[in-house]
Image (tube, grey):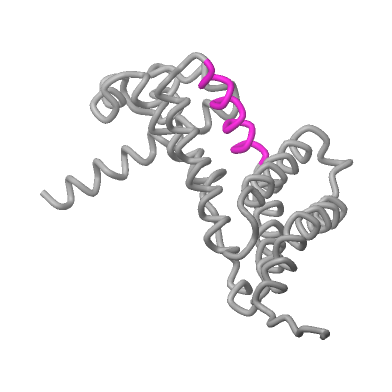
Amino acid sequence: MPRQKASEEHRREAILRAAYDVAARHGVEALTVRAVAARAAVSHGTVLFHFKRRDELVLVLLDRVLDATALLRVPNTLDRLTRPTERMEALLRAEMDRLSRDPRTFRLFLEYWTLGVRSAPIRRKVSAALDRYRGTFQTIAEGVPDGVAAVAVSLVHGCALQALIDPRGFGIEQHLGAAARLLERLATPQVDAAERLATPQVDAA
């Protein structure tokens, strides 16, 4: 029984990989049970055994796309950084680099985003994933003002979009430098104000 279960899990994973290949090559709209079965070299019935209908397959693949595009990977170097803005910049660098190197998956993320306009289940999944993504940014870079994490996520995804559209003209260092200066300006006034409040004021009189 355990061997059979492992075999079924392996087959389910192979079907998901085939679904990713079909969607990445031809778009999510081309993700049919028949196309996935052909790509995975299994029967139509085998795909339906693991995914009861096409909509289920589309949503499970979306989970995989969101794991790749809206789940923060924290670099090991972050532990050595203490300033919130430095931590945010390190996160930006890691995420900009990671997503800009994976254009096919980010293109699928954009396609799902568009499909979410008319599909409530897709819209809810994408929205929830982005909320978690922003929240993780905010937690790890604790100390930056509210709203900066949302700007950071927009910068990360904006860079990934530019890398997708114009890979030859995209330069991560140039974009990272501009992003770091923007975040510094957003964060510094409130950080300075907090420091002034924490510093005892000496009466000149």
Which residue is found at the position 69% from the left and 80% from the top?
199
Residue 70 rendering spot, x and y as whole percentages: 54, 44
129 relative to 96, above or below: above
Residue 171 rendering spot, x and y as whole percentages: 85, 49
Image position of 115 (left or right of 106):
left
Question: What's the magenta bit mostly, secondary-structure-wise?
Answer: helix
Residue 107 painted magenta: yes
Image position of 83 (left or right of 59):
right
Specify the farthest residue to the front.
205
Which residue is found at the position 47% from the left and 20% from the top?
31
Image position of 51 (left or right of 84):
left
- Point out the stretch of residues depicted in magenta: 103-117
28 relative to 159, above or below: above
Image position of 199 (left or right of 133):
right
How many marks overall? 0
Q: Nearer the viewer, residue 56 or 38?
A: 56
Q: Nearer the viewer, residue 21 or 56?
A: 56
